[in-house]
Amino acid sequence: MEQALAYNYRREGHSTTLALLHGFTGSAASWNPHIVAFSDVADVLAVDAPGHGNSPAPADPALYSLPHTTEAFLKLLDILNLSRVVLLGYSMGGRQALHIATTAPERLEKLVLESATPGIIDPAERVARRESDGKLADFMEREGLETFVNHWENIPLFASQKQLSLTVRAAQRVQRLQNNPVGLTNSLRGAGTGTQEPLHAKLKKLQIPALLIAGELDLKFCAIAQQMHELIPQSHLEIVQEAGHTVHLEKPDEFDRLVLDFLKI
């Protein structure tokens, strides 16, 4: 990627930097409610994924792939003179974090994964997922960003968010609508779960302390987190009660506590 990824870096002079990777339709701003708490123990680097926030939104979907994102992230660390970071990724950002961790483990002190997956093992299922994401991208191009966000807010994965206050949901909607539709469609086509290499075998060799977080109402990702917990040697699993896919949004205090406790170990 020709241009560097956009970011927000809060420096407090700590010896550790916590890097944050958001989910699909999010941005670095998604982490704003958590940065003050995290900055008590670490400098905090929130990064806009390709096609999201203020990061570049190239026309070629291949430039959104996990290998390209990994390269761009590592270049950003070099620009900021960061030799190692603690890396936290949510959902799509969790997949990016896993690819970074298995590609360049020497750049990470610790790893936090929220509602993440190491990919789809079955080739036919990967093809089906790519086709599904391609149809979503087509839908956004045809109907526009606002109609797509209306649809995205109401998929079953986010059903538990209906219990959130109108203020929180409205703020999330505003943030989603600030994204570039070209970036989102190409992210679906180039960085969807169906495009990524399954990382299960590589997780067994990962020698980084890892915290795995999932919400108890998100049964699919609880099962995936349990599977990763059994594969990653130095992993700790936390299932947060009364939360769904977006634990940091639905149970922010509990999420912050888990992350801060892990950072202090």
Image (cartoon, rainbow, N blue to C red):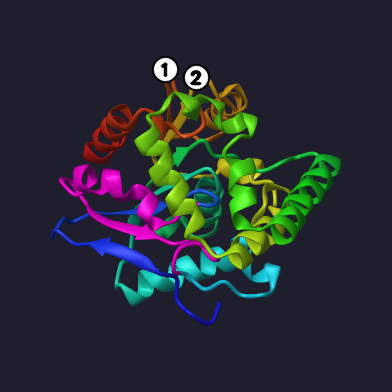
Residue 78: name its quadrant.
bottom left
Residue linked to disc 1: 241
Query: From where the camera sits, is residue 66 visible?
Result: yes
Which residue is at the far right? 124
Q: Say whether disc 1 or disc 2 marks the residue closer to the N-terminus.
A: 2
Residue 53, disc: none
Which residue is at the far bottom? 2
Identified at 75% across, 59% down, the residue is: 142
Identified at 48% across, 80% down, the residue is: 3
* Image vertical order of residue 223 relative to residue 56, above or below: above
* Image vertical order of residue 102 relative to residue 7, above or below: above
Q: Which of the image's four quarters has the N terminus?
A: bottom right
- For the residue marked with disc 2, what is the amino acid? Glu
Tag 1–tag 2 contact (CB < 8 Å): yes
Q: Does the magenta run of residues contain 34?
A: yes
Residue 216, disc: 2
Find numbered disc 1 in the image and state the secondary structure of the residue it sits on.
loop
- For the residue marked with disc 1, what is the amino acid? Gln
Query: On the picture, is 141 further left or further right than 236?
Result: right
Query: Which region is colored magenta?
Result: 26-54
Query: On the picture, is 181 further left or further right than 166?
Result: right
Whole-percent x, y for residue 147 in the image = 64, 50
